Image (cartoon, helix red, strand yellow):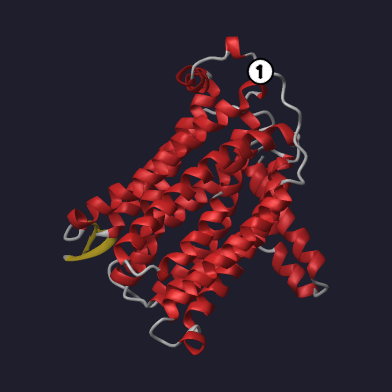
C-alpha cells in the first residue's frame, strides 16, 4: 500500500489546484510513514524469529552494505535526472516532471522489493490464546520491567536524541558558518558514505566475533569525538586546515556511523526475549523514534536563540612580563549543538556500559580486531609490498602495543 501511494504522489503535480495537491502530498507522506512504522515492527519481529542470534552482525552488515551503496547510487541518479530534465520537458516544467518520474521509479523498485519479500520464508507462529492476551499498555510495559532491556532503551533514547540534535545541522553549519558551497557539502557526504560502505563488512565480522555492544562501545566514542572536533575547524577563525579537517572528520564519521548503525539496528534483536520479541522491538522502536524526531525540532526551535551567542575558553601564558592568550575552544551558533550532542552522547555511552550482552569484550580487543581485519582485507586486495607495509605501520604497532599492554 505504501508503494502504491508513491504512484498517486507522482500524479499530484498534474492537479490544477495547488492547495489540494499540497494537502494530498502531506497526507500521502504521513500515510507512508505510518505504514512504514507498521511494516518495520512486523519486519523486526519476523527477522528476530527467522535468523539465528549468531551471525546477525555479518547478515546486517551485508544488508546495510547493499542498501547504502545502492541508495547512494540512486541519489546520484535522482540528482542527475533533476538537473538534466530540461532538455526532455523544457525548463519551465522540468522540476514537476522530473520528480514525478523519480516517484514512479521508486514505486517500481518498491513493488519489486515487495515481491521478493513474499519469497522469504516465515516461521510458523504459535496459536494465540485470545482469552489470555494482555492489553496493549500491559504489553508495552513488559520491556520496561526487564532491567537489562530498560537500560538498552535508555541508551537508544539518549543516543538518538544526541546524534539527531547535531547531525541534521552539520550541512547548515558548513554552508552558513564556514562559508562553503553546497557542492562541497555533497562531496563530504559522498566521502562519508564511501567509508561507511567500506567498513561495514569489518564491523559485521567484529560484531559476530565479539559482541554487538562491543562494536557500539568503540564506534560510538569515535563518532562523538568527530562531533566534538567540528568547532575546531574554525577556532579561532576559519583557517588553512579547515577543509582538510572537514574531510578527515567526515571520513571518520562515515566509518563510525557504520558501526553505530549496525549496532543500534541489531542489538535489540539479540537482547529481546523470544516469547515477547514483537513487544520488545516495538517498544525500542517507539522510544528511539520519538527521541530522533523531537531532537531536530528542539534544535530548530533553539537555533535563533543561539545565533548571537558565543562562549570562548582561553589559555593565558605569561612569561617575562608578556601575556599570550590562546583560544582553546570557541562555540558559536551551531557549535553549541555539537557540544550538547557530545555531552549527551557521553551519557549514552555511560548507559550502554550498564547493558549486559553475552560475549562482550574490552574496547581494546575490538580495536585490535578491526585493525587486523583492515590489514587482511588490504593484503588480499593488493600485492604491492609497500602497501602492506603501510597497513602495518602504525596499525600493526598499535595492535602489538595493545597485546603487550593487555
59, 219: nearer the viewer: 59
Q: Residue at x 51, y 55 (%)?
A: 5
Q: Is residue 36 above or below residue 335?
A: above
Residue 53 visible in the snapshot: no
Number of residue marks: 1
Q: Residue at x 47, y 81 (%)?
A: 83
Image coords of residue 185 (percent x, y) = 43, 72
Disc 1 target residue: 128
* Crowd around label 1: few <14 · some 14–19 · many ≥20 (10 Å): few
218, 77: nearer the viewer: 77
Give the residue at the far top of this rendering.
131
196, 340: nearer the viewer: 196
186, 50: nearer the viewer: 50
Q: Is residue 65 above or below residue 79?
A: above
Q: Secondary structure at mark 1?
A: loop
Q: Residue at x 26, y 62 (%)?
A: 327
Q: Quadrant of residue 133?
A: top right
Along the horizontal axis of the image, is 166 left or right of 37? left
Along the horizontal axis of the image, is 270 left or right of 264? right
Image coords of residue 252 (percent x, y) = 54, 60
Residue 63 visible in the snapshot: yes
Q: Residue at x 68, y 59 (%)?
A: 66
Q: Quadrant of the C terminus?
A: top right
Q: Quadrant of residue 236?
A: bottom left
Image coords of residue 334 (percent x, y) = 29, 59
Amino acid at each position: 500500500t505504501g508503494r502504491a501511494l508513491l504512484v498517486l504522489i507522482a500524479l499530484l503535480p498534474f492537479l490544477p489546484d495547488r492547495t489540494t495537491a499540497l494537502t494530498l502530498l502531506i497526507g500521502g507522506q504521513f500515510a507512508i510513514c505510518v505504514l512504514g512504522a507498521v511494516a518495520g515492527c512486523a519486519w523486526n519481529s519476523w527477522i528476530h524469529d527467522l535468523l539465528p542470534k549468531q551471525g546477525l552482525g555479518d547478515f546486517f552488515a551485508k544488508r546495510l552494505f547493499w542498501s547504502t551503496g545502492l541508495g547512494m547510487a540512486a541519489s546520484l541518479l535522482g540528482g542527475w535526472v533533476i538537473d538534466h530534465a530540461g532538455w526532455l520537458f523544457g525548463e519551465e516544467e522540468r522540476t514537476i516532471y522530473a520528480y514525478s518520474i523519480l516517484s514512479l521509479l521508486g514505486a517500481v523498485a518498491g513493488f519489486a522489493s515487495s515481491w521478493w519479500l513474499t519469497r522469504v520464508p516465515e516461521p510458523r507462529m504459535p496459536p494465540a490464546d485470545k482469552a489470555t492476551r494482555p492489553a496493549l499498555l500491559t504489553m508495552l510495559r513488559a520491556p520496561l520491567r526487564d532491567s537489562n532491556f530498560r537500560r538498552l532503551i535508555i541508551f537508544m533514547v539518549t543516543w538518538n536524541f544526541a546524534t539527531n540534535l547535531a547531525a541534521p545541522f552539520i550541512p547548515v553549519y558548513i554552508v552558513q558558518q564556514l562559508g562553503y558551497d553546497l557542492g562541497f557539502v555533497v562531496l563530504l557526504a559522498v566521502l562519508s558514505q564511501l567509508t561507511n560502505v567500506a567498513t561495514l563488512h569489518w564491523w559485521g565480522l567484529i560484531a559476530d566475533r565479539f559482541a554487538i555492544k562491543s562494536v557500539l562501545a568503540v564506534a560510538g566514542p569515535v563518532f562523538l569525538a568527530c562531533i566534538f572536533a567540528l568547532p575546531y575547524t574554525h577556532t579561532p577563525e576559519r583557517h588553512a586546515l579547515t577543509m582538510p579537517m572537514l574531510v578527515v572528520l567526515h571520513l571518520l564519521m562515515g566509518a563510525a556511523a557504520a558501526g553505530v548503525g549496525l549496532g543500534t539496528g541489531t542489538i535489540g534483536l539479540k537482547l529481546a526475549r523470544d516469547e515477547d520479541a514483537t513487544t520488545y522491538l516495538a517498544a525500542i522502536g517507539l522510544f528511539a523514534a520519538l527521541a530522533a524526531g523531537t531532537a531536530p525540532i528542539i534544535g530548530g526551535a533553539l537555533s535563533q536563540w543561539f545565533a548571537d551567542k558565543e562562549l570562548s575558553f582561553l589559555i593565558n601564558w605569561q612569561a617575562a612580563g608578556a601575556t599570550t592568550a590562546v583560544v582553546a575552544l570557541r562555540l558559536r551558533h551551531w557549535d553549541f549543538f555539537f557540544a550538547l550532542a557530545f555531552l549527551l552522547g557521553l551519557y549514552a555511552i555511560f548507559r550502554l556500559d550498564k547493558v549486559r550482552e553475552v560475549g562482550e569484550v574490552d574496547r581494546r580487543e575490538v580495536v585490535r580486531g578491526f585493525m587486523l581485519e583492515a590489514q587482511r582485507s588490504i593484503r588480499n586486495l593488493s600485492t604491492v609490498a609497500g602497501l602492506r607495509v603501510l597497513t602495518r605501520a602504525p596499525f600493526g604497532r598499535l595492535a602489538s602495543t595493545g597485546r603487550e599492554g593487555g
